[in-house]
Image (spheres, rainbow, N blue to C red):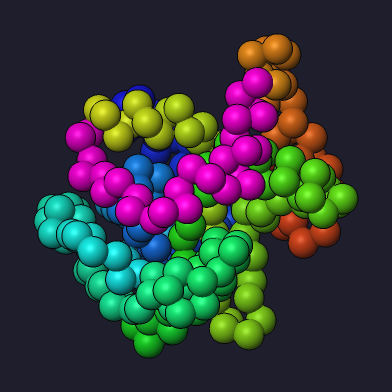
């Protein structure tokens, strides 16, 4: 996937849901995976010509795994002219050794998000960009239906009352396969997840189920995403169907 196409999808999401306003200070949570690195790259490039000026800050929450080397991420941020911060934590030790969680993902995510938000607020950012892509939206919907009995997924844009932060998801129109292609095209410095629970989660089950559904019913992912976007879910912002006409951009 070429950069121009990635930027087109990213800007479509940003414009359609008015994710970025003039003067925004946006933090990008960088896990080291392909998704967050691609989002960092896309927003850094978009920043150069987007009519509404904004600043970027990259933040990685170091969970405390051994051999988690962020040197390549730091170098990428330097090349993209993005400030980069690393938050050192002992989350891995707490979750796996002290608490010995049978369901480690829930506690880990909560602690990781808390550490990330604390640093975001300390840096004076008002928004945080997550790299959830189109497949993530659909997989979350499947998980909610199967395990919770409700029709629910991520929102493109969410205001958090407690922290006063706004969460944006500019990759909502980008598929995981397209991100893989972009990662290979740009040779992004991906760090393989050292988490022992990686690939053994409910999300991984939903991912495999979605792949099977798509194989047996070609085009079903597009139809599910369309049903999600236009399903009038509580908390979803209104979509501007012709954002360029609306904004005059």
Residue at 64% x, 14% y: name it.
215
> Which sits in the foreground, 150 or 223?
150
Spot occupied by residue 118 in the image (x, y as percentages of width and height):
44, 84
Please give the count of numbered marks on the rendered protein.
0
Q: Is residue 111 visible?
A: no
In the image, 177: left or right of 225?
left
> Which sits in the foreground, 80 or 22?
80
In the image, 26: left or right of 207?
left
In the image, 94: left or right of 236?
left
In the image, 119: left or right of 48?
right
Residue at 13% x, 59% y: name it.
71
Spot occupied by residue 174 in the image (x, y as percentages of width and height):
50, 35
Asked which quadrant contains residue 77, the reply is bottom left
Magenta stretch holds residue 209: yes
Region in magenta: 186-212
| Image quarter (top left, top right, bottom left or bottom right) of the N terminus | top left
Spot occupied by residue 114 in the image (x, y as percentages of width and height):
50, 79
């Amino acid at each position: 996937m070429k950069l121009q196409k990635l930027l087109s999808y990213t800007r479509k999401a940003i414009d359609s849901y008015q994710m970025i306003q003039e003067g925004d200070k946006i933090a990008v949570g960088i896990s080291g995976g392909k998704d967050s690195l691609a989002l960092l790259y896309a927003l850094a490039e978009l920043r150069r010509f987007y009519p509404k000026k904004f600043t970027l800050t990259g933040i990685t929450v170091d969970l405390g795994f051994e051999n988690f080397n962020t040197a390549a991420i730091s170098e990428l941020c330097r090349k993209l002219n993005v400030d980069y911060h690393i938050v050192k934590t002992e989350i891995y030790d707490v979750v796996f050794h002290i608490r010995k969680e049978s369901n480690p993902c829930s506690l880990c995510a909560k602690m990781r998000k808390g550490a990330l938000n604390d640093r975001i607020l300390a840096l004076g950012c008002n928004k945080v960009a997550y790299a959830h892509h189109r497949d993530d939206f659909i997989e979350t919907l499947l998980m909610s239906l199967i395990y919770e009995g409700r029709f629910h997924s991520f929102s493109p844009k969410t205001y958090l009352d407690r922290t006063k932060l706004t969460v944006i998801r500019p990759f909502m129109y980008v598929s995981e396969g397209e991100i893989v292609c972009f990662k290979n095209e740009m040779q992004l410095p991906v760090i393989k997840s050292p988490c022992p629970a990686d690939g053994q989660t409910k999300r991984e089950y939903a991912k495999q189920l979605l792949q099977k559904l798509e194989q047996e019913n070609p085009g079903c992912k597009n139809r599910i995403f369309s049903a999600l976007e236009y399903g009038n879910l509580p908390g979803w912002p209104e979509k501007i169907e012709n954002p360029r006409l609306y904004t005059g951009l």
